[in-house]
Amino acid sequence: MSGFFEGRQLVIASMHQKEQVLQPLLEASLKVTVSVAYGLNTDLLGTFSGEIARIADPLTTARKKCELAMDLSGCDLAIGSEGSFGAHPSAFFLPANEEWLLLLDRKNGLEIHARHLSTATNFAGQAFSNLEELDDFAHKVGFPSHGLILRRSKDNLEGILKGITAPDQLRTAALQLLETQGAGFVETDMRAMFNPSRMQVIGETAELLLQKLNSYCPSCQLPGFTVTSAEPGLPCSLCGTPSSAALAHLLVCSHCQNEEKVKFPHGKQTEDPQYCQVCNP
């Protein structure tokens, strides 16, 4: 079943240059020809800087991007992505980047997605009352390789300046804020073309998606046959006690829902005693 998508035209639903990382991966792995939906305004579905709130969840938003891109381009195969930023769900003191990447295939009625949560992000923002505070923040978040946004205050949507990547531009805009109101607010620009860290996470998400797209269901022969859950219980090699390591993986087809349990998914039938709750509590 290799080459399921080979020879087809695939459109990327993005206005933020995500094709820089996605196009080489997609063309090499799927043997498709990639284009971009020029004229597509994905900001209408929500902006990170708050002018337009994202109403739907990330997966629904990515799906909408795909549909709009296909309608605009005439393609029947599209990929859309959506990112979110905030505190990590378990390590609350760390910022996190959650990326969703969705492939929509109208021709075959397929929808396959991947989700990736990463702490490799510079997502941050703070108020400043002098240039020293601003410079310190800019240094910590990787400016100028990573873009910045300036605004009057954290919740003020008037006069936002985005995509700042030049030190002179940052200084001039900051001085104007300091002179007119004595303070300002600076934050990272999380749009992909202004944030190499996010672009890297998008690439990692694409690798996860490609694994799914190159895994075929033994029942319906369509791509998207992937691991949906793990069953713990791999026995300790010393005492035989079930450990938290995976004893089996459950694979489910995203199209026909065919299921298959694969035992010993990592190629080993016992776990090292150092990970055993009994031998090494």
Image (cartoon, rainbow, N blue to C red):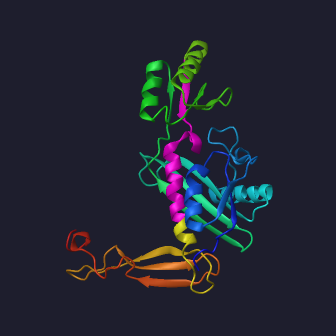
Pick the residue in front: 87 or 75: 75
Number of marks:
0
Does the stretch in magenta take in 269? Answer: no
Vertical order, 135 against 123 (above or below): above
Pick the residue in front: 220 or 156: 220
Name of the residue lying farthest toward the bottom: 219
What quarter of the picture does the C terminus occupy? bottom left
Vertical order, 134 against 276 (above or below): above
Name of the residue lying farthest toward the top: 179
* Residue that appears at 40% across and 78% down: 265
Vertical order, 195 against 158 (above or below): below
What quarter of the picture does the N terminus occupy? bottom right
Residue 3 horizontal side relative to residue 63, left or right: left
* Residue that appears at 22% across and 69% down: 274
* Residue that appears at 53% across and 41% down: 195
Residue 94 horizontal side relative to residue 20, left or right: left
Pick the residue in front: 81 or 259: 81
| Residue 191 in view of the camera | no
In percent of width and height, residue 90 lies at 43, 55
Pick the residue in front: 31 or 118: 31
In percent of width and height, residue 235 lies at 29, 81
In percent of width and height, residue 113 lies at 60, 65
Q: On the image, which quarter does residue 69 sit in?
A: bottom right
Vertical order, 62 against 191 (above or below): below
Dominant secondary-structure state across the stretch colored magenta: helix
Q: On the image, which quarter does residue 5 sit in?
A: bottom right
In percent of width and height, residue 156 lies at 64, 29
Q: Find the magenta span and give its range.
A: 183-209
* Residue that appears at 44% across and 75% down: 230
